[in-house]
Image: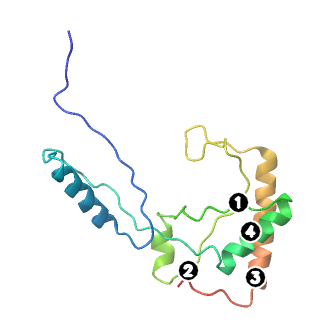
Amino acid sequence: KTVTPAEAHARIDIRIVPDQRPADILAAVRRHLDGHGFTDIEIIGREGEPAWWTPPDHVVVTTAARVSEAVAGQVASSGVSMAGTVPMAQVCEEHRVPATSLGAGRADCRAHAPDENIRLDDLAAATRMMGRFVDAFARLPAVPKVP
């Protein structure tokens, strides 16, 4: 016999971009569902953090790319649309602090998955990149706030 459950549950992870607010996106999803006749779907907002990003031409980002290229011997890869959420907004937004990431990895590293991994030679390269970044950052005459 076929058993049809009385209810179903789903988890949706929505990545937002700078200047969007989580409550506004949640309200937009609600309007969309209602507009298509799904008024019986309950939405439970569990987390919601604003996005934070630093423009790709900011000196902190270009410095990170420069030291990464020096260590890796190849052009740095930059992901402009990878805005950070927790804890970037809480740490950086109020005082307009720039943020970036740097490191070494591969497309098959499975970042944030249960089997996330990094090769030892990539870890050593990432460590050298971080050391060089700290040195280069300390030599910057000024670090402007994010506009």
Q: Quadrant of residue 97?
A: bottom right
Taking 6 as reference, is 88 left or right? right
Determine which residue is flagged by label 2.
Answer: 97
Q: Residue 82's x, y, as percent? A: 55, 61
Which of disc 3 and disc 4 is earlier in sequence?
4
* Residue 46 in picture, x, y percent from top left: 31, 54
Q: Label 2 vs label 1: CA separation?
A: 22 Å
Q: Position of residue 16 (x, y in %)?
A: 42, 62
Q: Secondary structure at mark 4?
A: helix
Mark nearest the camera among 3 and 2 is 2
Residue 99: give x, y in percent of width and height: 59, 72
The CA distance from mark 4 to mark 2 is: 18 Å
Distance from the alpha carbon under mark 1 to that under mark 4: 8 Å
**Residue type at numbered disc 3:** Ala
What residue is at 30 percent from the left and 40 percent from the top?
Answer: 10
Q: Relative to 44, is 98 above or below?
A: below
Q: Which residue is mark 1?
A: 77
**Residues at marks 3 and 1, CA–CA distance in whole angstroms:** 23 Å
**Mark 3, residue position:** 138
Give the foreground label among 2 and 1: 1
39 to the left or right of 9: left
Amino acid type shown at disc 1: Ser
Q: Secondary structure at mark 2?
A: loop
Please determine whether, in this image, residue 8 is positioned above or below residue 38. Answer: above
Q: Which mark is residue 65?
A: 4
